[in-house]
Image: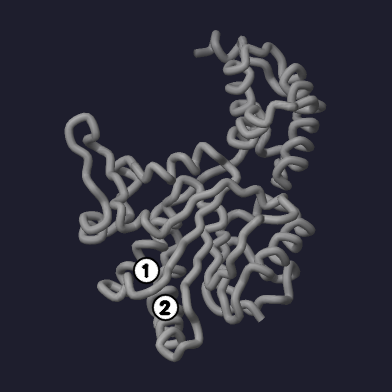
Amino acid sequence: MEELNSRMPSLTDSEFSELVKIIYDKTRIQMTEHKRALVNARISKRLRALHMDTFKEYIDSLKNASDDEEVTNFINAVTTNKTDFFRENKHFEYMKSNFLPAWEKSYKEGKVQNLRIWSAACSTGEEPYTIAMTLHEYFGERYDKYDIKILASDIDTNVLSHAMRGIYKEESVEPIANSILRKYFLKGSGENEGFYKVKTVLQKDLFFRQLNFKEADFNIHTMFDLIFCRNVIIYFDKEFQKELFLKFYKYMKEDSLVFIGHSETLFGISDKFKYVSSNIYKKI
């Protein structure tokens, strides 16, 4: 292992700075010095895959990139995708106890026609599938009465492919209660032992697509009741955070909600939302 590591190049200060700039230009994600080892390790894998010897060679290829596939590989390599089923579960409890009863009442009164939810940085799919489970658990047999759709997007095409397959290792599904797991997942056997697959009932109203928050126009033609964008904005500078939530605002129905991560805030970022509970904000 020591011999292998000795043959791997190490980023110089100027190379790291150039890669940080490219990452920012492509994604608006900020990489600080403490991410240097991560960038070094992940881009080293791209060098090996492309049979390149130096970071400079790779940086030059990105600067002159007519190869959209490698730009996509680069973005996939440097993005972080930490997620879990029922992560920050207070948000899903709030959905069940507060939002969904109010939405259903409005539906019966003829004030709303559909329910649209966006998991805006869905990673490997745990969040949108948790949203789907929460909806099915709340509505039960009433679910099919309603027009419900979930959009799940991410910048990283690799994690989107994982999410669309809906197959998870046993340790990944540990946060899910056994009764819920049996209801919504198929347990693998034989060569698939140790894996669980999401059942079609959760996937049928879930739509995946690649989306970069940097895009001027998201090309989305719907308005949302709920937007989940959790543990994402910590990677952006304040100016881009402001831009992003201005974009979200335009895609939100009246009285809709946005959920952000427990370490995040909209204070100083947007005055178009008011704090409700547990890092949940309501459109003003």
Most extreme residue toward the bottom is: 109
**Front-lying residue, 155 or 242:** 155
Q: Is residue 282 above or below residue 124?
A: below
Instruction: Examine the rendered structure and indicate whether residue 113 appears above or below residue 43.
Output: below
Secondary structure beneath disc 2?
helix
Name the element at disc 1.
helix
Label 1 Cα neighbours within 10 Å, binned few <14 / some 14-19 / many ≥20: some
Which residue in the protein does label 2 denote? 100
Residue type highlighted by circle 2: Leu
- 256 left or right of 186 in image: right
Residue 279 appears in the rendering: no
Q: Position of residue 100 (x, y in %)?
A: 42, 78
Residue at 40%, 88% (x, y): give it: 108
Q: Within the image, what quadrant is residue 133 found in?
A: bottom left
Q: Position of residue 140 (x, y in %)?
A: 27, 72
Is residue 276 rendered to the left or right of residue 31? left
Mark 2 or 1, nearer chain start: 2
Most distant residue in the right direction = 14
Q: Marks 1 and 2: in contact by CB < 8 Å?
A: yes
Where, by quadrant of the figure, is residue 71 drawn?
A: top right
The amino acid at mark 1 is Leu
- Look at 32% across and 40% down and name the residue there: 169
Residue 67 x/y as whole percent = 69, 26
Between the residue at mark 2 and the residue at mark 1, the CA separation in whole angstroms equals 8 Å
Residue in view at x 59 percent, y 16 percent: 48
Give the image location of residue 222, x and y in percent.
58, 66
Q: Residue at x 49, y 41 (%)?
A: 159
Q: Nearer the viewer, residue 269 or 246?
A: 246
Residue labelled with disc 1: 135
The label on residue 264 is none
